[in-house]
């Protein structure tokens, strides 16, 4: 058996994010394929609802791709009146970089950039 790599593939990153969200106490469902740029829906009771988009570290390290993804998610927040948080996540070795998406951009929640 081989060791777990220090990176995640596109196939495994959504499942890892789903498990992490569940460890925070959320019930989760993976949305695939999705007509909107969301990978995971999580909820905790009746009051907490979160929509998560997970991207690869390659996309996070590419400023142009990252900016396009942020614009896409900010557009979703502007166009759909959600009573939920929209978050953008990327996995880096040892932690998740998590960002909350607002109509005008993003704010770091946790990770190396928080």
Image (spheres, helix red, strand yellow):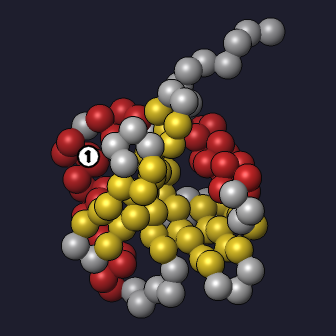
Please state if 69 lies on the left or on the right of 1 as rendered: left
Percent from the top left, x then y, of residue 102? Answer: 32, 73
- The one of 46 and 37 positioned closer to us in this rendering: 46
**How many other residues sit within 10 Å of disc 1, few (<14), some (14-19) or many (≥20)?**
few
> Farthest residue toward the right?
1
Q: Quadrant of residue 73?
A: bottom left
Q: Give the residue pinned by disc 1.
A: 65
79 versus 101 height, above or below:
below
Q: What secondary structure is marked by label 1?
A: helix
The quadrant in which the N terminus is found is: top right
Q: Residue shown at 52%/37% (left/top)?
A: 95
Q: Residue shown at 24%/55% (left/top)?
A: 68
Q: Residue shown at 32%/61% (left/top)?
A: 107
Please state if 49 lies on the left or on the right of 103 as rendered: right
Percent from the top left, x then y, of residue 75? Answer: 29, 75
The answer to whether residue 36 shows anywhere in this view is: no
Q: Residue shown at 69%/57% (left/top)?
A: 24
Q: Quadrant of residue 81?
A: bottom left
> Farthest residue toward the front?
114
- The one of 27 and 65 positioned closer to us in this rendering: 27
């Amino acid at each position: 058996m081989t060791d777990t790599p220090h990176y995640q593939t596109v196939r495994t990153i959504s499942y890892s994010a789903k498990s992490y969200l569940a460890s925070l106490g959320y019930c989760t469902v993976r949305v695939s394929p999705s007509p909107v740029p969301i990978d995971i829906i999580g909820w905790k009771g009746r009051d907490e609802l979160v929509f998560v988009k997970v991207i690869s570290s390659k996309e996070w390290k590419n400023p142009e791709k990252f900016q396009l993804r942020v614009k896409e998610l900010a557009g979703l927040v502007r166009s759909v009146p959600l009573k939920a948080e929209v978050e953008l996540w990327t996995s880096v070795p040892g932690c998740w970089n998590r960002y909350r998406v607002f109509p005008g951009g993003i704010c770091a929640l946790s990770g190396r950039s928080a």
